[in-house]
Image (spheres, rainbow, N blue to C red):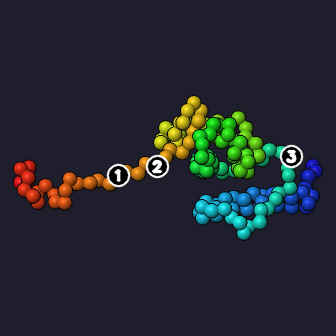
Amino acid sequence: MSIKVPSTLDWLEKQRAWHVQEAKRIDRAIVAYKKEPISSAAPIKAKPDNSATTKTGISWTAEVTEILTSSEKPLRLSHVCKKLIQKGVVDTLSQSQKQIVYSVLARGARKGRFEKAGVGLYRIKPKIEKAARVRGGFFDEKEIGSPNSS
């Protein structure tokens, strides 16, 4: 029985790829907390891999919300998917991942986070500030002796 042992170089390249993904996650977390882009950190470029890899533990709702927030106009599902790939969340989107993105958009629209701006178009629901309640005058009705006061 022979056991195939990976070469040291292969093992080190796999470790490096894992650490590069972790560094990207940390950078995204820092950006999310600061709400500003990181300019001092130099981007780490991983060796291109031919296989379609995805990061594990993606917060799809947070990623889709961030994309819709940064967009000034409503986006279709296909545009959201393209922006996820451009952002580096995933290398390619499988059919099941597209279904996840669609579910996030539909659920967000149902819950009121997103708004359907047309057939297949979604955007962040604009926040409407409530007007301050204004009373009729300076005094409360009880103070001025209205007939309803006791």
Q: What's the distance in space between the residues labelled 2 and 1, CA to CA?
A: 13 Å
Q: Could you say which is closer to the camera, residue 79 or residue 15?
A: 79
Name the residue rendered at 69%, 46% in the picture. 84
Q: Which amino acid, by three-letter code, is at mark 2? A: Lys
Name the quadrant containing residue 47. Answer: bottom right
> Element at badge 2?
loop
Position of residue 117 in the picture relative to residue 86 (left or right) = left
Label 2: which residue? 127
Q: Is residue 45 left or right of residue 29?
A: right
First along the sequence among labels 2 and 3: 3
Placement of 110 over or under 70, stated as above or below: above
**Residue type, mark 3 in image:** Asn
Q: Nearer the viewer, mark 3 or mark 1?
A: 1
Please tell me how many numbered marks the rendered image carries: 3
Going 49% across and 38% down the picture, which residue do you hit?
Answer: 110
Q: Residue at x 82, y 59 (%)?
A: 45
User: Which amino acid type is marked by label 1?
Assistant: Ala
Q: Residues within 10 Å of mark 3 (few under 14, many from 20)?
A: few
Quadrant (top left, top right, bottom left, bottom right) of the C terminus: bottom left
Q: Position of residue 139 (x, y in %)?
A: 16, 60
Q: Which residue is mark 1?
A: 131
Q: Can the viewer see residue 71?
A: yes
Question: Residues under labels 2 and 3: Cα distance?
Answer: 43 Å
Between residues 9 and 129, which one lies in front from this camera angle? Answer: 129
Q: Nearer the viewer, mark 2 or mark 3?
A: 2
Q: Earlier in the sequence, mark 3 or mark 1?
A: 3
Q: Disc 1 on helix, strand or loop? A: loop
* Percent coordinates x, y for residue 12 in the rendering: 86, 61
Residue carrying label 3: 50
Please provide percent x and percent y for residue 143.
11, 60
